[in-house]
Image (cartoon, rainbow, N blue to C red):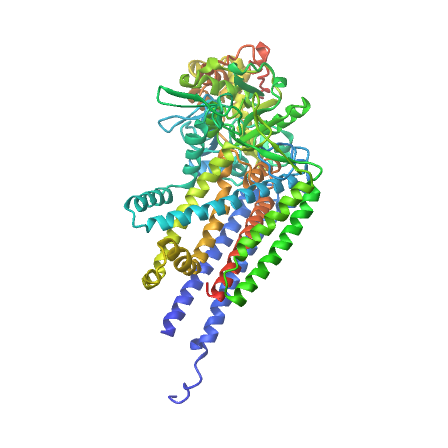
Amino acid sequence: MAGTTIGRLSLWRNVRVQRFVIQAAFAGALAAFGYYLIDQARDLELGFDFLEGRAGFDISHQFGTSYNRNDSRLDLYIAGIVNTIRLAGVGIVLATLLGLAAGVARLSGNWLVSRVATVYVETVRNTPLLVQILFWYIAVFLQLPRISESINFPPDRISFLPFFDVPFISFDLAFLSVRGLALPWATTNDGFSLWLIFLAVAAAASIAVRFWRGRRQERTGQPSYPNWWLLGTFAAIALVGFAIAGGPLDPERPVVGERSYDGGIRLTAEFTALLVALVTYTGAFIAEIVRGSLQAVPKGQTEASAALGLSPFQRLGLVILPQALRIMIPPLTSQYLNLTKNSSLAVAIAFPELVGVSRTIINNTGQAIPMFAIVMATYLLMSLAISLVMNTFHWRLTREGG
Amino acid sequence: MRTRWLLIGIGLLAAILAIAAVACGDDDDDDDNGDTPANGEEPANGAQVGDTLGDVVARGELVCGVNDAVPGFGFLEADGTSSGFDVDFCRALAAAVLGDADAVEYVILTAAARFEALSSGQIDVLIRNTTWTLSRDADLKATFATTTFYDGQGMMVRVADGISSIDDMAGTTVCVLQGTTTELNLADRFASGGLDYTPLTFEENGPLEAAFTAEACDGWTSDKSQLAARRFAYAEADGGPESLVILDETFSKEPLGPVTRDGDTQWSDIVNWVVIGMITADEKGITSQNLADFVADPGNAETARLLGVSFEGGEIFDSNLGIDADFMQDVIGQVGNYDEVYTKNIEPLGIPRAGTLNASWLNGGLIYAPPTR
């Protein structure tokens, strides 16, 4: 028997058979679980017809959508999605900036700066997000004055100390109260579509100019400032177009009405509280990612760039950060995904994002399973989109070598 | 080495199969009991549909879905106990079924989560100021028992704002709870008046009250009883109850009562007849104080049937509800009749019973018990 085992293992010990059996068993168990779930749901009357029904209630925040109570539940859900995207989009940008600043600050040689950053990161990272959202809303934004006592900017008078009190600018640009922050905005008039054409031309021309300047710099080696040229070209064409279109935007200042602000654009206390909570929370995690990535760049890089005579700011911006970015991107992506998903806590403080409106729809129709399936599919799509963008970025970064 | 991996693999496989077997086992159990929503809604293969009563008795405890934020109706006290009008009906049901009014586990639910909790079987009965509507009855597969409290939606505003009717409220912001009929009625009422408004829709009463107190909204809309309760408890530091006014207009009918799952008629009947029994006891003047006298001498046949005692040597009336014939003795003895529960919980809020819809029909109200026969 001794000779036969060379080259021929028993079936029991054949690694390929083992793998096959284990994987088949796992797939079988998964299928059984899936069947169990479907079997449980089979008797329920499932369908998506309810989405076509009249929604019947109003929501407080809309951005670019014009849903009203007589529209379908699908329109309502879309308004909820737009609210989520708006919150997550702005949140991701601000959280990245905050996280970058706090992460760099934690490594600062300045004792005070690094301690402040440490306290921020450790406090915010170690308390629950829902508590923070309620804190920002109730303890901060709801403490602002009522609308009739709005804080105005610029102030009418400047006064400090008992003896200094002089009149200042008497017209108001912005107001702040518990009803939110009212800012000047602009409405469009007839010339706007003409100006849009100019903007498109400006975009095309500026990209072409940047390309030309970039090539010139590569060819001659002389600094040709392609990005400044891009900005300059765009601004020049846009301004000329603005004049030709006869001023397509009418500036509009907010006015304090009896119970709401009229005109201008309003950032509500609910949206702002939510944004601040999400940004500070996610920013703390990003700060740790930034710190870890910066520390992962070999110390020799810092020393070498110092030896070349670069300033500390140049060292960070030109040498360290580009290398750290490659390490940073994958964990950063998961923070972006977290921020997007955490925005579903918004319902606690009356911001109607997609989970909030879905729960009301479920309450009115009883269609919990199809609605939650739609919500899950929506988040999955948003997360995949974020991952796609970030992975593409990361791929380009690693391929080009930073 | 390879053997070890194989053993680990087999172990994992066994674990997975065990989990799958447990899952399938659950499935079989559910077919017998039919207490999941999937099976509870459709009587399949002539199997027994739902046995909430059996589950409650086996557990020795009633699981009741309640509110925690409306004083007088369902409120979580500082010491962790629940109290209120709705809570007393949970206690009455536990007294009827288990003989012990304290054998209740309270599950605190938000307005938005309550029907999910009911249909998933997390709770046996929902008694959480829930309005009886057609779509809830049909779409949400809920069964509503006799109305315990006739309510209506109102609007509370600050006296200082000088609002005297809903029609003065154009351009205002209104605070409302998510997942309530209130949210829909609000939209309908403002639409019919052609009024522009912004709703601030909260999931919980706490942040809503904070927003209202901070004047982030001009109006607070809810059932009038709830508004009265919140107004009653409005902090003196914020101006006290006198700084708020509930507008006269009632813009919806809100009949509130206990809710059970569709498909378990026996359990729904029990819930219904415990409520009716408490109303009957009120009509007949049977209270927790004088219960013993009526048990000793019922005085008439209906009282004897209600209390499950013999009248003039006759046979004891059996309701066939599946619980003891004298269940109302436990209910009245441990919790009280309808009027006692109302007086204890709701009168302190400043809502008297006399002269309202919730007075007995004998006094011109709507509270009326079908005959116990």
Q: Residue at x 34, y 57 (%)?
A: A295
Residue A84 image point, x, y percent = 55, 43
Seen as rendered, the residue at the extreme bottom is A3
**Could you say which quadrant of the image residue A2 lies in?**
bottom left
- In the image, residue B189 sits, relative to residue A65, either above or below, namely above
Q: In which quarter of the image is the N terminus of chain A?
A: bottom left
Residue B96 image point, x, y percent = 47, 27
- In the image, residue A294 sits, relative to residue B164, either above or below, namely below
- Front residue (pair A232, B71): A232
- Front residue (pair A351, A348): A351
- In the image, residue A385 sits, relative to residue B217, either above or below, namely below
Residue A331 image point, x, y percent = 43, 55
Whether residue A245 can be seen here: yes
Residue A209 image point, x, y percent = 60, 57
- Front residue (pair B166, B161): B161
**Could you say which quadrant of the image residue B260 lies in?**
top right
